Image (spheres, rainbow, N blue to C red):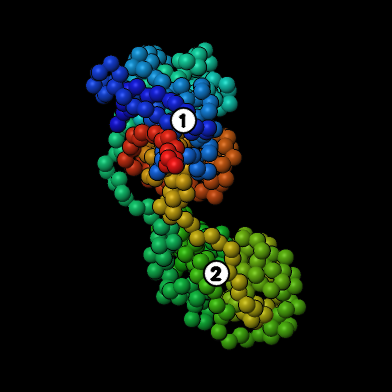
Amino acid sequence: MKFLADAFFTTPGPGVWSISLSSAGGSPALSRLAVAIGVALILLGGASMSDASAQSRTAANNIDEMRTLYATPEDIAQGKVLAEQSCGGCHGVNGVSESSGIPNLAGQRAPYLFLELQAYKAGARGDNPMKDQVKFLSDDALLKAAAYFASLDPVDAPAANREKPAADPVALGKAAAAPCAGCHGEIGVSAIPGMPSIAGLDPKSTVAAMKAYRDGQRDNELMKSMLASVTDQGMDNIALYYALQTPARSQAPADGDKAQGAASAAGCAGCHGSDGVSANAAFPSLAGQDPGYLASALAAYKQGTRKDETMKGLAAALDDGAIKNIAAFYAAQEPKQPEVRKPLTTEEWAQRCDRCHGVNGNSTDPRLPAIAAQREDYLAMVLNDYRTGARKSARMAAMTDALTDRDVAGLAAYYAHKKARAVVFIGLPPPVSPQK
C-alpha cells in the first residue's frame, strides 16, 4: 500500500496536524506516490491528540523529521539512485537484504529510517560501516533515501512454519522427566525410601547433579545410562520443571538423632544453610530430603565414589552415627521453594514487544521500526546487541535484560514469520463545535 499524492500538512488548531490527500493536476492518484508510511499517529473519532500520541506530536513538530511527508515522485526517484549507489550492495536496491545480519528496509517507517541514518552519521551508533556510508551525505539525501525505501512494498514473510508455536521449556521438561517418575515421583517428590526428592530444588544444582552422574563423577550406572542421551538443553528443561514443583518434607523414618545432628551439621551451614535451605544455587538445599539418601550421599563422599574434594574432606571425619544424625536433622527441616521465574512463552514476550512495535510487529509509531518479516538472523543479532549493551537504548536494555538465548531465538523466528503490512497514518482535524 502506498500514500496517495499529494500530502499537505495544515494546522487546524494548536497541536493538531491533519493531512489532505489528493491527486494533483488531475492525474490518477496512484500514479503519484508519497511515502510517509508511518509519519503521524491515527487519531480516532476526530479527537485532538491524546496522551497516548504525545510522543508522536513531539516528532511531528520537528520539520526535518517530517519532511518525508512532502516527498514527491522526483524525490523518490533520487532516493532510488542513492540506494543503487550506496545502499543496494547490502540492503538490496529493492530493500530486500540477501546478506546475513543485514536488515530489510522495504516498507520500513520513513521517519524511523531517517532518524537512524542521522544517528549513524552523527556516530551515535558507533564506528561501523554504516557510519562510513552516510558520513558525507546531506540530510536531504538521507530523507530521500528513507522516502524511497519506505515507498516499497514490504517483504513477504517466509511461508514455512509461519504460525509454528515456540516450544515451552516447562512442557518439554515435564515430557523429558517422564522416565524419572518411577523413582522420584511424577512431580519430583519421592515416596520410595532412599530415593531423593528433586521438587523445588534450584535448577543449577539439579543440572550439576545430572551432569555429575552423566560424566561419572557420581558412581551410579543407572543414572549414567539414563542421562547419556540427554542434551544440556534437555537437562535445563528437566531441572526447570522440577524447580517449579512444590517440595514436600520426606515422610521416611530416620535412624539418627536430629538434635545431635543439628550440632554435627554446623559445619555444613556455610554452603547448605543453617536450616538446610541453601542461599547459593551452586549448593543444593537439603531441607526435607530423604534421610536414607542423605546418609548414602555422605557415605559416598567419604568413600570417594562421589568425587568432590571439599565434601570428601568434610565427610572424612564423620562416623556412621554422625552421618545418620545429620541426615535426620536435615530430613526434619521444612523445604523452601527457590525463587525461580516461570519463563514467558514467545507469545507472552511478543505481547510486550507489540506494545511499541505494533501488533505482530507492524509498528504504528512512525519513529519505531516495523519488525514483521524482518530477517531472522538480523532480529536475533539486534536483540543480543541490546542484551550486551553493544547497542544502546535504556528501554530496550530493560526489555531484553531477562531474555535467554532461547527467548531471543524464539522472538526472532516469531517476528520473521509474521506478515508485514504497509500502513497509512493520517491526523484528523478536531471536531467542529456545533453552532449556537
Quarter of image, res 275: bottom right
Disc 1 target residue: 12
Q: Amino acid at mark 1?
A: Pro
Asked whether residue 321 is in view, the answer is no
Question: Quick check: marks 2 and 1 in contact, CB under 8 Å?
Answer: no
Residue projecting furthest to the front: 436
- Classify 391 as above or below 168: above
In the image, 143 versus 34, the foreground residue is 34
Quadrant in which the N terminus is drawn: top left
Given this view, does label 2 or label 1 mark the residue nearer the observer?
1
In the image, 406 versus 84, the foreground residue is 84
**Residue at 64% over, 81% down:** 332
- Classify 31 as above or below 157: above
**Residue at 45% over, 75% down:** 185
| Image coords of residue 224 (percent x, y) | 46, 63
Gap in Å between the C-alphas at discs 2 and 1?
63 Å
Q: Earlier in the sequence, mark 2 or mark 1?
A: 1
Mark 2 crowdedness (10 Å alpha carbons): few <14, some 14-19, many ≥20: many
- Classify 397 as above or below 34: below
